[in-house]
Image: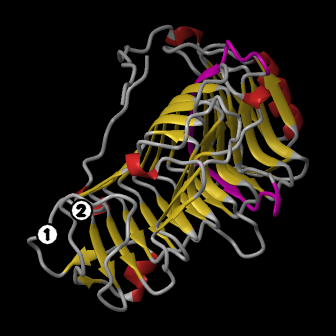
Amino acid sequence: MKWVCFLAVVLTGIAAAQSITVSDSAQLQSALRKAEAGTTILLQPGRYRGSLYTEGQAGTAENPIVITGADPTDKPVFSGGGQALHLADCRYVTLRNLVVKGFPSNGINIDDGGSFDTPAHHIIVEDVTILETGPKGNHDALKMSGVDHFVVRRCRFIGWGGSGIDMVGCHYGVVEDCLFEGKEGFSQSNAVQLKGGTTNILVQTSLFRHCGHRAINLGGSTGLEFFRPRVADFEAKEIEIAGNRFVDSMTPLAWVTANGGWVHHNTIVRPDKWTLRILQETKDTRFKPCYGGVFENNLVAFDSRVDIFVNIGPGTAPETFRFRRNAWCDLEGRRKPVLPTPEEDGIYSVPIDAEESDLQAGQVRFKDSTHTNFGADNYERKTMKWQ
């Protein structure tokens, strides 16, 4: 995967930085209008009404705009309105230490303001909790359209309608150390969706539990007018899914009209129906058949709910997928997986050591310590850098 490097810089211009403390939504909206490079907006604990909108806010690499809860132990809570916060065509902005709860449309919306050739960029979302979005239909906890060079880290997504994170035409991003957990009464189509020309994304070291139909939708089905920056021949490309734990989704991962994709060192526990899916949901003939995925060094613990290991849809190229060095454990017997291509150096009927509480946490270990380099416990975390 190709990544663009970021050269660390020593913060300068500290004298120009300012802090604005706010305690209600009106003050926050006013502070957003005034914010410039180096501004930190400190939200006091309490309730804030949503439907806040800001456009074109621009920090710099040295002096970003930071919107943060003032007290990390007592975070401000957004509730009421269609969505909590919409950032349009912003750059070098950080959202931190916020709670967003109960919005019917989306939780937080970050996009390019419709200017496809000038994406929003250098956005950080960290230590943010988004609860109970939707509850049903295409309503996302974090919606991102046309966002480049971003990080979503240490966030919690619990209960949503469409996606926990929905990416359309996003590039050079990292999602890490997050929790995605489905909730009864919410439709939860997927936890992370990467579509509409999305490229160069790493999803690592996160926990996906009870995440509905597809925990990660690597690709999707996007209206041609929404591709960013323009339509190519794929929904998603250069995607890496590594070091994660998946528990109890219908399928942990689906490749959908995707070009490649590297899925490795994940721990997958008790999929509800399939281990993987390979699909072609975009019917336009300019798109290549879904092809070229690599699934390796994963640990998969499955039971009788998995009858078909890989669900293959029409118009795909399953013969181009590669399966290498995965460890498979049938929790109820000694079945081996049936895969679309022969696996290289897989191991099967692997005895594991795990109580029910371990399985719920995605914590699965081998009884035989000679087995190494499989699953999330053996993933070497990556530090991705920006330009």
Answer above or below: position of 236 versus 134: above
The question of residue 237 being in magenta is answered with: no
Q: Which mark is residue 9?
A: none
Q: Which residue is mark 1?
A: 371
Answer above or below: position of 219 versus 191: above
Tell me the quarter of the picture where residue 261 sits: top left
Residue 67: x, y in percent?
Answer: 66, 33
Please name the residue shown 61% across and 56% down the image. 191
Local secondary structure at mark 2: loop
Range drawn in magenta:
114-137
Distance, label 2 to label 1, CA atoms, is 8 Å
Residue 303: x, y in percent?
Answer: 43, 84
Say left or right for 321 vs 24. Answer: left
In the image, 37 versus 263, the foreground residue is 263
Q: Which residue of the protein is positioned furthest toward the left in this rendering? A: 370
Q: Which residue is mark 2?
A: 374
Please name the residue shown 45% across and 52% down the image. 318
Q: Which residue of the protein is positioned furthest toward the bottom in this rendering? A: 332
Local secondary structure at mark 1: loop
Answer above or below: position of 263 versus 225: below
Please rate how many residues cluster around mark 1, counting C-alpha atoms within 10 Å: few if below 14, some from 14 to 19, many from 20: few
Please rate how many residues cluster around mark 2, counting C-alpha atoms within 10 Å: few if below 14, some from 14 to 19, many from 20: many
The quarter of the rendered structure image containing the C terminus is top left
In the image, 371 versus 149, the foreground residue is 371
Kind of residue at badge 2: Phe
Kind of residue at badge 1: His
- Can the viewer see residue 73? no
Residues at badges 2 and 1 in contact (C-beta under 8 Å)? yes
Tell me the quarter of the picture where residue 232 sits: top right
In the image, 135 versus 352, the foreground residue is 352
Please name the residue shown 48% across and 47% down the image. 317
